[in-house]
Amino acid sequence: MSDHGDDRPVRARDLARRHVLSAGGALGLVAFTGLTTAHALARRPPRTGAALRSEVPLPPPFQVPLPIPSVLKPVGTAGGIDRYEITQRATTAEILPGVRTPLWTYDGTFPGPTIESRRGRPVTVRHRNELPVPTVVHLHGGRTPAASDGYPTDLVLPKAWPGRAHGMGGMRMGGMRMGGMHMSGISGMRDPRAAETRLVRDYAFPLDQRPTLLWYHDHRMDFTAPAIWRGLAGLHIVRDDAEDALGLPSGHRELPLMITDRAFGAGGELRYPALDPSLRERPGVQEPYLAGVLGDVILVNGAPWPVHEVDAARYRLRVLNASNARHYDLEAVTDDGRRLDLVQVGADQGLLAAPVVHRSLPIAPAERYDLVVDFARVPVGGRVRIVNRLGSGRTRDVMAFRVARKARDGSRVPRVLSSDVPVWRRSEAVRVRDFSFRAGRMDGGHGWLIGGRPFDPARTDVTVRLGDVEVWRLVADVHHPVHLHLVGFRVLSRDGGPPLPHDAGLKDTVSLRPGEAVEIITRFDGYRGRYLFHCHNAEHEDMGMMANLEVV
């Protein structure tokens, strides 16, 4: 990682080539992709991750109805604050028809219950942990004070956790044994005063932010990937009056769609190649899956290849890729081969200034897209499949819509969606920083590094001043979806050229393609404190691809 005080135009292709050809990057590419040169990488981008195969019979597609996650009711609203309670607990559920699958859940469901909020109205969520391991909750995309952002060592402990009295169970402490558990350095703590552990934790979310689709998920250090895989993910929607007045499809014609992939064992359990299936001591995955874990079953809202009946009308699809490592390139295709427009009205951090029309749409892990699809010209009885152009076999299908009836449609997609999308100019930036995201060595084994270093909670990697505008130049070896906590950003360029159509609007996660350099610009406003930026390929994150960001 390096800081630059100038604002010179980026020579993106040269920068990408320099990082990819560095010694550590080249060794990592061989280890993770089997490619022997960066030139081969550029010509033939590798698939991110390795696939697990389910050991039970899988259902045919488009038979299971699409579930809609329940909306959580507050337990109190006094003082202008909505208060919620969620218990994290193990349960079993029927995901594949006729098969019971053990899950870790928020309030007993996968996905967890949806929280619906109004812009500027504070929310507190009390989380109680009844799981067998510590957890951390992060509201992804939230403008959140540092104490509630879900730092990886701010744990919610179960009652029976060893070493609970000392507040240190479950954190890596650099090869030491503390609280009876294996840790990996005093680096496992933010600092000796700040590694907070509690049996119950209240997360406070001011929600002074643009209306959008957020999501909450586990963020425990070293074990985020398997915890999300087991079910710890849910949606949080922020709304406001201005958005409500636009006339976008609403009510039953607004659908949240959490897309994930999983694989199932012979007993119906979720397969995951953890080195320690108990998720208590040894982090990491088996060697073939170091680049990411892929499943062979596509789930939407926890159902395999579901189908949903719709009116011949516009629908608003709030799409989240909550997969650990799988990328999608989505398109909507009728049975006679016609592609429907995907009209994008919003990105990770809320509404676009104006709609953008796509025929297909790439979506990386943790990205969200707010889309309108019009079924009006599909005949009653007709079907529209959502397919993944990056998939093959069973993973090419995602879900389907079946048009059930003609209906009146009073919705619209305005030509102007929002006037409050931030626009920062390059000339406003006080600093330009370079970050490489690449494979390398850590703790004597394979890892994923930012700026050549693995994550260390005791180290401050970047310090920014509250209110400053900065340009960050991000360079990848293989696919890396990069997420910044606290702030949204705009994509300025890709490989020295303009952003792509799907880069529109305010984002908090950007997909870096193999060998690519991407420039982003943001203002670090909101709150002071310690935050993170990291790759949202969850296996990469767990194996070191995370860094500390201090806002002062």
Image (spheres, grey):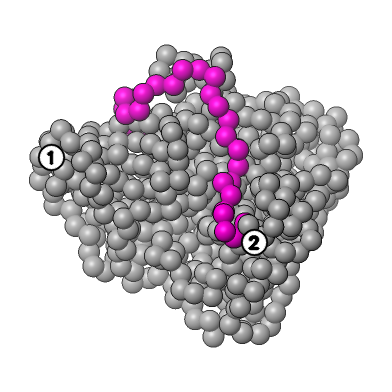
In the drawing, does residue 359 fall left or right of residue 524?
left
Q: Position of residue 291 (x, y in %)?
A: 65, 44
In the drawing, does residue 134 fall left or right of residue 516?
right
User: What element does badge 2 sit on?
Assistant: helix
Residue 82 visible, this angle: no
Residue 427 lies, with reference to residue 254, above or below; the image says below
For the point 10% across and 45% down, which residue is it? 408
Assign the N terminus to one quadrant of the image.
bottom right
- Near-viewer residue (366 or 485): 366
Q: Position of residue 418 (x, y in %)?
A: 32, 67
> On residue 379, which mark appears?
1
- Near-viewer residue (175 or 137): 175
For the point 16% across and 43% down, which residue is it? 378
Q: Which range is magenta? A: 41-69
Q: Which residue is mark 2?
A: 39
> On residue 283, which mark appears?
none
| Amino acid type at mark 1 | Pro
Q: Position of residue 208 (x, y in %)?
A: 46, 60
Residue 50 colored magenta? yes
Q: Residues within 10 Å of mark 2 (few under 14, many from 20)?
A: few
**Residue at the limit of the structure toward the right, as seen here:** 176
